[in-house]
Image (cartoon, coloured by chain):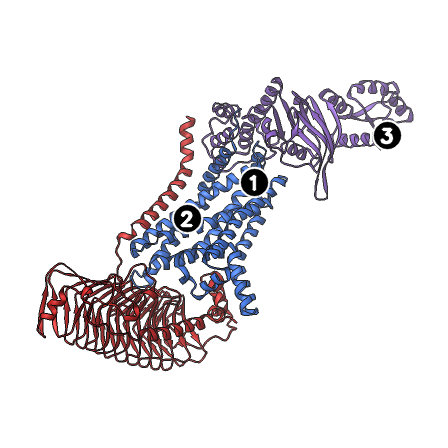
Chain colours: A red, B purple, C blue
């Protein structure tokens, strides 16, 4: 027997989730680096009184560093801290440490079981600000800590490595009250990894080209606002958690196999509003959740806008705009108590004759082709074909199949004004030069060939005279 | 230059041509004469390589090669019965295309356009041409390669007077150049005027071949004189039969078949019996009757 | 008498056919319709997302490919049949010339291909300029792949049009009717029938049937190949993986698709040539 499409997806996530819970367990805590692996700055730090301020002049400092007393380590003119290549570059082992203004190079060193990172934090109220971390397995690793702040940092992973051989951008395990603000994370395994980390605020971060943009479990009462998670092979996954708020985030371009813009699994009381969830293989995935609320989001250009299991209960999907999705809804299991109300569906052909802003009939969130593909994975090969379209037309004319009951009871007739939803980021334009040139060339070649055919007569006239 | 050897062509159940054997030598101008559906077009198409023989052989050239081979057709130029051209091309473009195709020198384009009296219309689209102009354009294309063998299917059927002049000129020039022409027609005028030899096809079979003068003689034989005389009697009939043995009485009319040259003597014989001629009509041979007669003769020869 | 070579002959006929195609009203109409629809597709994503510019090339490509699959086989068949089933008097004159029939047919096909390809390139160019200027996405490879797929379909269905025309000399209306049936079967009916049969089979057999069908039908083969090439396995989600598993990996899948497209490119044309060489005109 071949598992259905959705079973495959579910299976995939189950495996991934359990594997990552295991991976997320922290390793040993590295202590003071050996003398020969230590940075010249270690002496400076050791000499500084607790609560002191250590300023570092521009230059390159090779070796690792442990901070075991509260102090402010300030880089002037972006000094470069190049690790020994054997362990974490900065190890923070005391509370109330501030690290500000460094370029940190992990030299691809260390290993994942020791959580080797650019900055490894195992203490409360640590702040890392304006740092650029590159070539480190983990960017910033935080464990068993409260009130850690990471601001305006840029974390770039190790290029060319498989995701399995890289660490997360920012990895938080057993923390509370963390604040991650305005960071940029690129080319790591998981952009933000949060496990057993509650009551945090995650704002304005940009995560791209990763496996999971957000990999999240057993963490309650976190707020995500104005973040961008894009180009994730798997998208974002939120599991086994409660009372999470997603507001004005972008979940976009997650186009990997079975990628999901926003996956919610075994979560309760999640609120997602004013988000842009666009160009994902699957827009939103809901399984085993209670009381999920999705409102005023734009869900656009996904293969399937919403994948929902019957195990999801009390879901409300209201006032969203569903634009250009291949299929609006994929239900696993027939029973669903989800409320769809007042959403806009760009494929809904119904008119609004009474002018109340709602189309005159409910919008049924399934087509006969969804029925096929639900039962047979390979049927998706035909999803863009005309067979699917003609089946749809035929089914509308002669409704014979008993399809799912899910429907939007009062769909909007026009796209709602969702001005709080963030716009897509505009990519750099210069990369478009070559396809633009190609298009222009295609146009020119086509036009000139057709023109040559037309000109032939005039040419003959000249020759014949 | 053109050789049919036991050529047969079957279309489904219909046998269009049956065992045609005919040789057209260098410098011959041969006409295929016959009623509609007699196999003239099929034979010409076979010579032009458009039709594969069901049996037998159709070859052109010296030495002869099967006309279905493109190489063999280098020496032929064929004009179909109802030629047509793409409406959007100009006459000059059509001729220029065939010039390039046949590898003819560039000067030929103006020559043939002039010869076909089309040099004023060369730049107009063929779609604006009259039927006669299209046929003349066809002739121009046929002349273009200066081919040793011309194959023309009913060339005069759709021609206007200009075209006929062009056509006769073309054939005469070819004859004087020692080239070979095979054409079909059901008009005696063309045939008698142009052909050295005439092959008569009826229902797919070659029933006779004549030289131009033989045909003229045979057709002259085909005449019938009808006479109404004041008093008919066996004596009158017997008198006439001394000259025209096939004479018969049909009602009150005396019907006298026989060559036109005999008619004065028939009249003299009639007068010698004392009969008075009230009315007289004479007609020359009708082709359909002639065809039937040829078939009958052939069946006598090959029962 | 200097006889031009075969290649020169093919060029001569191709050029003539190109001129005829361009001057017939159908090619310019096709060019305009195709360009208008391509532009509409290019803009539509933009409009649907409320001027978001969300529409990068990969997403537009799906719609453009659908447009190609619908229009290109239809126009190649119809324009091909109309051009390759000329009036009897024209065909007789042409085929009585000292040129092999294969050369004539291939030359005409080349000319028609040039005309239709040129008409499509105008549309693709216009759509590409719109999409890329909005979305600013790298997509040159995908764009080229889509154009290549469209051109392959053009050539395939011109070959089929040749086969239809050659079998119906002097019966243009009948040839056009057959062309329409062929189009409907290739683009719609085949897939519907396959999906219908698939529902009756056990899942494993059904998957193999669907994958085979997608490879065998040239329209599906071009669609699948193009979309997989542009979007990777995201094109059909899990079905992409089923496709790769049944075919034995992405390289094997690509090989199967290429072989299918190649066979469709060659076989109908070869059959048409052989049939034409035996035909009485």
Q: Which mark is residue C234?
A: none
- x and y percentages locating residue A108 in the rendered image: 27, 62
Asked if disc 3 and disc 1 are in contact, CB closer than 8 Å, the reply is: no
Chain hosting mark 2: C
Tell which tag, 1 or 2, sits nearer the viewer: 2
Q: CA distance from mark 2 to mark 3?
A: 81 Å
Q: What residue would you read off at disc 1?
A: C87
Q: Crowding at label 3, few (<14), some or many (≥20) Cα neighbours within 10 Å?
A: some
Marks 1 and 2: same chain? yes
SS at badge 1: loop
Question: Can the viewer see residue C192 in this picture?
Answer: no
**Depth check, front residue: C22 or A446:** A446
Q: CA distance from mark 3 to mark 1?
A: 54 Å
Question: Residue at 37% of width from left, 60% of height from top?
Answer: C59
Q: Which mark is residue B249?
A: 3
Give the answer, above or below, for where A437 lies relative to A206.
above
Question: Residue at 39% of width from left, 44% of height from top?
Answer: A446
Q: CA distance from mark 1 to mark 2?
A: 27 Å
Chain hosting mark 3: B
- x and y percentages locating residue B129 in the rendered image: 50, 34
Q: What residue would you read off at disc 2?
A: C120
Tell which tag, 3 or 1, sits nearer the viewer: 1
Marks 2 and 3: same chain? no
Left of B13 or right of it: where is C155? Answer: left
- x and y percentages locating residue C279 in the rendered image: 63, 41
């Amino acid at each position: 027997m071949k598992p259905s499409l959705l079973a495959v997806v579910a299976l995939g996530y189950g495996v991934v989730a359990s594997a990552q819970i295991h991976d997320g367990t922290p390793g040993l805590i590295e202590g003071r680096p050996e003398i020969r692996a230590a940075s010249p700055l270690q002496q400076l730090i050791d000499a500084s009184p607790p609560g002191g301020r250590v300023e570092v002049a521009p230059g390159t400092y090779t070796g690792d560093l442990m901070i075991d007393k509260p102090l402010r380590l300030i880089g002037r003119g972006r000094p470069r801290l190049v690790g020994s290549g054997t362990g974490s570059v900065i190890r923070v082992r005391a509370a109330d440490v501030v690290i500000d203004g460094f370029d940190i190079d992990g030299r691809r060193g260390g290993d994942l079981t020791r959580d080797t990172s650019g900055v490894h934090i195992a203490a409360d109220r640590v702040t890392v600000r304006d740092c650029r971390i590159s070539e480190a397995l983990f960017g910033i690793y935080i464990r068993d800590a409260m009130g850690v702040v990471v601001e305006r940092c840029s974390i770039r992973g190790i290029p060319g490595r498989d995701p399995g051989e890289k660490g997360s951008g920012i990895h938080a395990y057993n923390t509370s009250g963390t604040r991650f603000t305005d960071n940029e994370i690129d080319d790591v395994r998981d952009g933000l990894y949060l496990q057993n980390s509650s009551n945090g605020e995650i704002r304005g971060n940009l995560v791209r080209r990763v496996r999971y943009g957000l990999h999240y479990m057993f963490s309650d009462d976190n707020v995500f606002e104005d973040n961008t998670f894009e180009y994730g092979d798997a998208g974002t996954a939120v599991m086994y958690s409660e009372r999470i708020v997603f507001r004005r985030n972008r979940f976009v371009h997650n186009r990997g196999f079975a990628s999901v813009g926003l996956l919610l699994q075994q979560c309760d009381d999640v609120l997602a509003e004013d988000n842009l969830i666009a160009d994902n293989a699957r827009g939103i995935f809901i399984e085993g959740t209670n009381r999920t609320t999705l409102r005023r989001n734009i869900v656009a250009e996904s293969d399937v806008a919403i994948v929902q299991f019957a195990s999801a209960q009390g879901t409300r999907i209201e006032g969203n705009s569903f634009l250009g999705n291949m299929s609006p809804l994929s239900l696993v299991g027939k029973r669903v108590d989800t409320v769809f109300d007042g959403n806009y569906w760009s494929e809904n052909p119904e008119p609004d004759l009474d002018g109340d802003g709602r189309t005159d009939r409910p919008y049924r969130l399934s087509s006969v082709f969804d029925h096929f593909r639900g039962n047979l994975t390979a049927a998706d090969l035909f999803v863009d074909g005309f067979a699917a379209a003609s089946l749809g037309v035929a089914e509308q004319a002669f409704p014979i199949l008993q399809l799912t009951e899910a429907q939007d009871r009062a769909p909007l007739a026009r796209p709602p004004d969702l001005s709080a939803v963030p716009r897509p980021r505009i990519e750099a334009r210069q990369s478009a030069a070559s396809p633009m040139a190609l298009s222009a060339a295609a146009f020119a070649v086509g036009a000139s060939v057709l023109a040559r055919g037309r000109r032939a007569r005039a040419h003959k006239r000249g020759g014949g005279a | 230059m053109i050789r049919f050897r036991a050529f047969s062509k079957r279309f489904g159940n219909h046998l269009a041509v049956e065992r045609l054997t005919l040789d057209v030598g260098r410098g011959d101008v041969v006409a295929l004469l016959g009623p509609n559906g007699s196999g003239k077009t099929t034979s010409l198409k076979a010579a032009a390589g458009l039709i594969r023989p069901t049996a037998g052989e159709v070859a052109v050239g010296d030495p002869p090669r099967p006309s279905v081979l493109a190489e063999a057709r280098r020496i032929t130029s064929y004009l179909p019965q109802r030629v047509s051209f793409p409406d959007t091309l100009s006459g000059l473009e059509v001729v220029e295309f065939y010039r390039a195709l046949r590898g003819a020198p560039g000067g030929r384009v103006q020559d043939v356009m002039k010869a076909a009296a089309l040099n004023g219309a060369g730049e107009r689209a063929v779609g604006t041409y009259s039927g006669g102009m299209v046929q003349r354009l066809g002739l121009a294309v046929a002349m273009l390669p200066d081919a040793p063998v011309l194959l023309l299917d009913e060339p005069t059927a759709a021609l206007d007077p200009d075209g006929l002049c062009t056509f006769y000129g073309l054939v005469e020039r070819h004859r004087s150049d020692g080239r070979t022409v095979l054409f079909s027609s059901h008009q005696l005028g063309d045939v008698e005027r142009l052909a050295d030899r005439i092959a008569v096809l009826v229902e797919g079979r070659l029933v006779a071949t004549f030289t131009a003068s033989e045909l003229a003689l045979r057709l002259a034989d085909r005449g019938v004189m009808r006479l109404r005389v004041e008093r008919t009697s066996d004596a009158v009939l017997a008198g006439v039969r001394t000259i025209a043995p096939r004479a018969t009485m049909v009602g009150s009319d005396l019907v006298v078949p026989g060559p036109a040259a005999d008619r004065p003597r028939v009249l003299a014989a009639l007068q010698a019996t004392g009969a008075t001629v009230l009315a007289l009509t004479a007609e020359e041979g009708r082709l359909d009757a002639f065809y039937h007669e040829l078939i009958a003769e052939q069946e006598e020869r090959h029962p | 008498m200097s006889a031009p070579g075969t290649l020169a002959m093919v060029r001569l006929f191709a050029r003539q056919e190109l001129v005829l195609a361009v001057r017939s009203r159908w090619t310019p109409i096709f060019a305009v319709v195709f360009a208008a629809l391509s532009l509409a597709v290019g803009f539509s994503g933009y409009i649907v997302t409320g001027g978001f510019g969300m529409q990068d090339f990969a997403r537009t490509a799906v719609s453009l490919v659908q447009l190609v699959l619908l229009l290109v086989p239809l126009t190649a068949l119809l324009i091909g049949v109309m051009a390759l089933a000329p009036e009897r008097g024209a065909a007789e004159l042409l085929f009585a010339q000292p040129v092999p029939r294969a050369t004539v047919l291939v030359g005409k096909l080349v000319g028609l291909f040039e005309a239709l390809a040129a008409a499509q390139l105008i549309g693709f160019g216009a759509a590409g300029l719109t999409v890329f200027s909005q979305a600013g996405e790298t997509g040159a490879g995908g764009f080229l792949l889509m154009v290549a797929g469209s051109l392959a379909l053009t050539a395939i269905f011109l070959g089929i049009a040749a086969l239809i025309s050659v079998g119906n000399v002097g019966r243009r209306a009948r040839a056009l009717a057959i062309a329409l049936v062929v189009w409907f079967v290739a683009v719609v009916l085949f897939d519907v029938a396959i999906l219908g049969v698939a529902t009756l089979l056990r899942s494993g057999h059904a998957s193999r049937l669907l994958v085979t069908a997608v490879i065998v039908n040239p329209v599906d083969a071009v669609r699948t190949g193009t979309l997989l090439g542009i979007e990777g396995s995201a094109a059909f989600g899990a079905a992409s993986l089923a496709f790769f598993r049944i075919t034995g990996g992405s390289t094997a899948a690509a090989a199967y698709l290429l072989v299918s497209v190649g066979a469709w490119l060659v076989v109908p044309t070869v059959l048409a040539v052989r049939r034409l060489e035996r035909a009485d005109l």
